[in-house]
């Protein structure tokens, strides 16, 4: 299927590693010109060089950083709000009110800053895509990571609210909620868990056991791969998704 992305310009926030980098690569493979965002110039340049894109540097947790990114990016057709933070060590017991505020700023308000910078231009041109990168924990929170789950619920709600605002504009707004995805950072975390549980010392040693132990509530029966998530985001970014609006699509293997 031709996703008709040739000639489209996409900004993927937080795209120097992990899911953001995979999304940037996939969009570029489908013909989009991708602006790679990060704070580390060397890392951003490395990704941009590989995919034939450009870079926009800035700390989106500040208004000044958002201004710098908007100026560097120029006009865009596709905004993927991927930037976010996750700290598995934080729980109800040890996360402070200041932690909640700081995480909300990064996981939610950075996306709002980008929406306010770029969506008016999309509306004036009559076409655009805005995608919030989310997690199934926004709808299925656990007893740990309450702050992270709350920010993802906010991302889903933001996508739906923005869709109402964008009615009849030619611009769509959606979210994509991830289940367990085997990014480099999640793999590193799983290796630590596996070592403590006695499953082995390396991912190769413990992969089969980890898949079996950690996916008992996933219908597909395995951990997801980054490209499987990025493919869904890329479809939503394309003209082919024109009748998908205001929804959160789950890429979670049937997690229940």
Image (cartoon, rainbow, N blue to C red):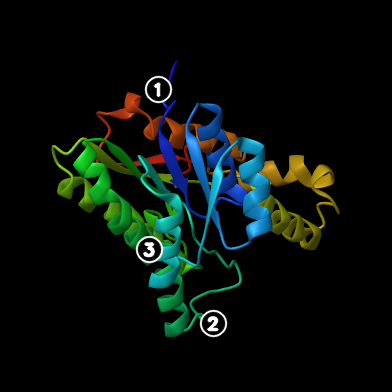
Considering only vertical position in the picture, is 209 above or below 144? above
Corner quadrant of residue 86: bottom right
Horizontal and vertical percent position of residue 116: 28, 58
Q: Is residue 24 above or below residue 110?
A: above
Q: To which residue does mark 1 refer?
A: 4
Dot 2 and dot 3 residues touching (CB under 8 Å): no
Q: Earlier in the sequence, mark 1 or mark 2?
A: 1
Element carrying mark 1: loop
Q: Which mark is residue 94?
A: 2
- In the rendered image, residue 186, in percent from the top left (x then y), is placed at 65, 53
Q: Residue at x 42, y 27 (%)?
A: 5
Q: Residue furthest left?
A: 168
Side of 78 where 37 appears, left or right: right
Tag 3 residue: 108
Mark 1 neighbour class, 10 Å CA radius: few under 14, some 14 to 19, many 20 or more: some
Query: Measured from the top left, where is residue 251 in percent x and y?
Result: 46, 39
């Amino acid at each position: 299927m031709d996703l008709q992305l040739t000639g489209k310009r996409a900004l993927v926030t937080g795209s120097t590693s992990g899911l953001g980098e995979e999304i940037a690569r996939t969009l570029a493979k489908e013909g989009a010109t991708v602006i790679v965002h990060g704070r580390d110039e060397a890392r951003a340049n490395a990704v941009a060089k590989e995919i034939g894109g450009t870079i926009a540097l800035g700390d989106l947790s500040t208004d000044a950083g958002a201004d710098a990114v908007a100026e560097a990016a120029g006009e865009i057709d596709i905004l993927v709000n991927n930037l976010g933070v996750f700290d598995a060590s934080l729980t109800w017991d040890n996360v402070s009110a200041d932690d909640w505020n700081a995480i909300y700023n990064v996981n939610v308000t950075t996306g709002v800053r980008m929406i306010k910078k770029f969506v008016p231009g999309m509306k004036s041109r009559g076409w655009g895509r805005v995608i919030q990168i989310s997690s199934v924990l926004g709808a299925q929170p656990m007893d740990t990571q309450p702050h992270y789950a709350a920010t993802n619920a906010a991302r889903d709600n933001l996508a739906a609210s923005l869709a109402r605002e964008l009615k009849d504009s030619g611009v769509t707004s959606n979210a994509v909620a991830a289940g367990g995805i085997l990014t480099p950072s999640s793999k590193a975390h799983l290796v630590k868990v596996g070592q403590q549980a006695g499953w082995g010392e390396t991912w190769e040693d413990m992969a089969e056991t980890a898949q079996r132990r950690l996916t008992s509530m996933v219908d597909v029966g395995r951990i997801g791969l980054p490209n499987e998530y990025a493919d869904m985001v890329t479809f939503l970014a394309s003209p082919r998704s024109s009748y998908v609006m205001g929804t959160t699509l789950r890429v979670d293997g049937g997690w229940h």
